[in-house]
Structure formats: C-alpha cells, structure tokens
Amino acid sequence: MTTPVMETSPTTLPLRLTPPAKMNLHLRVGPPTADGFHPLLSWMVTAALFDNLEFTLIDRPGVSLICDDPTIPCDASNLIVKTASALLESIASPDQSRRTVRGLSAALQKRIPVGAGLGGGSSDGAFALLAVNHLLNLNWPAQRLSDFAARFGSDLSFFFHGPSSICTGRGQIVQPTPIPNPRFAVLILPAIHMPTPAVYRRFDEIQLGHESSLTNPPDWQHWSSLSADALLPLLINDLEAPAFSLNSSLADLHRSTSRLLNRIVRMSGSGSTLFTLYDLQDQAKHAADLIQNRLQTRAIAVELCPPLKFPPQP
Ligand code: C5P
C-alpha cells in the first residue's frame, strides 16, 4: 500500500497519528428514550489495530481529506472533516484576516475495518480533534475535547480517556477503569458490514430493552482482575441477538468459532467483529491461525490497551 500524497502545500511538518480500534468487552443496552437513542452500560478498551492519519496545517481555510480506501467518503460526511472543521470554526474569530486563517490537510490510511463495531471512524474523528488541539496549541483538556466530540457520535468521547473505561449515557459519559488482566484478544473479522441503526431497530422490534440491564453494574475492579477464563462467562453483548437475527452468516460464524476454539466468543459493538480473550499472546496467535486456516475467515491476535504514541512527534 502506498502512502497517500498530501495535495496542498504544507506550512508545517505533517503530524502523524495512529488512532486505535475500540472493543466493547461488555455491552448492556436499555430501552430507547424519547429521542430514539438507547442508554448504555459498556466496558470499552482500546485494541492494537490502528489507522494511520497524517495532518498538515495549511494557509487556507477548510479541511481536505484523502484516503487510500476508495470506499471511504472524503467529503463533509467524513467524521475527520466534520470534527476538525467544527473545531476550527469554533475557534475562528470573526475579524480574522485571510492571511492568518488556518485549515487542515489530512491523509488517512484505513486499516480498521469499517462497519465492524471497532469504532474506527469515531477514533479517526476524535484524533482529528487532538490534532487540531495540538497543531494550534489550543491546550483544551481531554474532558473539553470529549464533550465537544460527543455531538458527532456516541463512541468518540471514549478515545479521549481510554484505554479502559466504563461508558454510560449514549456512550459519551466516560469513566476510566483498570485495564483487564487478560491482555490479548483474537479479533474475528468477517467481510460483513453491520449498519448500527438497523441493529438497534431490530433490538427494539424484538423488545430486548429492559431497565434492569443497566441497574446493579458489575464490580469493575474485580472483573479487571480476572483471568480470561473467569472473565469470559461474565461478559454480555445485548446487541448480539439483533445482529445475529439480521445476518445469519454472522450467527453461523459465532457458532462455528465458539465450537472450533471450545471457548466463549462475544461480539464488539453492533458487529460484525467477534472476539475472545486470552491471558497469553501465544494462545491468541494460535487461535487466530486456527480460525484463518479452518474457517477461511480473517482473524488477528491483538494486544488490549496498547501504549499510545500521543502526544506525537512530527
Ligand atoms: O452515535 P452513533 O453515530 O454511533 O449512532 C449511530 C446510530 O446508532 C444512531 O443513529 C442510533 O440509531 C443508534 N444508537 C442508539 N443508541 C446509542 C447509540 C447509537 O440508538 N446509545
């Protein structure tokens, strides 16, 4: 894969960032509120699967984006363009002369699968805000960026706190929690795109939302101390039933991976990524190889809560 070429003349060196994927280890969903959104209770962690994002400040207003994946829209609908433009606009003073107006040129190498429940678009959007904050020396604290980001989607706020957090509300109320004791996961990545709104709609159709799902939250401290074998039976994703009912191939893959590994397999977010946890990296690598070889489905072993390279060096 070739590195995308910046299309504008840069005034500073590019800032290189590596937005990580997220996983929902545990995801409980309540009945929808009046605005149609669902209250959540989720344990979210970062995973060592990264996009590559390059930002350069330019001397003209606006945000331009190029991407090595032609299926990704690079227009105003892209979360990178949306969040960075909104932040640049919010800090622009009305009397700013043309000469001092700053814009952003961005280049994305997409590595986190799209429509996979791994929060790749949200992570990119959140890191675009971190980039603007850094390049323009705004010095906004993480919580202010997190609050600003929440209007662009339920998953963005997590990325300002991570790497292990309890997310409530729509997902935008983020409370850091100890990282899980099992440090490795196998991500099973079928070529299936799950549309999040449709999964929530099916969740409502089959009337799965119960207030009781959100009451009596677990003792997260205790959960984070458990081995993979002790933790896996406690984990729940309330969106699995609607996702599997929408896509029978995903339901079949869930059954076949659990059987092949003789292990509990969960789904992340609204799918399509399935995962299981391991204490040791070799166990995770072995399981990923087994899935790839026997089921011809992409599977990778990843570290959970990897160290992040931010603040970055240009
Ligand atoms: O916030 P985000 O853009 O990720 O949400 C995508 C869709 O998922 C929403 O439009 C909504 O239909 C559904 N959703 C929900 N409740 C949440 C989060 C998302 O119903 N807490």
Image (cartoon, helix red, strand yellow):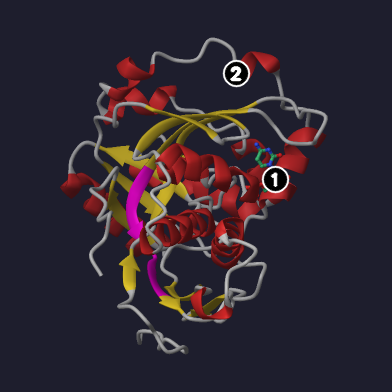
Q: Pick whichever of labels 1 and 2 is earlier in the sequence.
A: 1
Tell me if 51 is positioned left or right of 215 in this view: left
| Residue 134 image position (x, y, % from top left) | 36, 58
Please name the predominant secondary structure of the magenta segment in the image: strand
Figure label count = 2
Tell me if 309 is positioned left or right of 192 in this view: left
Q: Is residue 263 visible?
A: no
Residue at image location 56% in from the left, 36% down from the top: 172
Element at badge 2?
loop
Residue 279: within the magenta? no
Q: Which residue is mark 1?
A: 199
Residue toward you, 232 or 113: 113
Bounds of the magenta span? 46-56
Q: Is residue 106 visible?
A: yes
Residue toward you, 44 or 96: 96
Foreground label between 1 and 2: 2
Where, by quadrant of the figure, is residue 30 drawn? top right
Circle 1: residue type: Val
Tell me if 304 is positioned left or right of 196 in this view: left
| Residue 105 image position (x, y, % from top left) | 47, 77
Q: Which residue is mark 2?
A: 214
Q: Quadrant of the C terminus?
A: bottom left
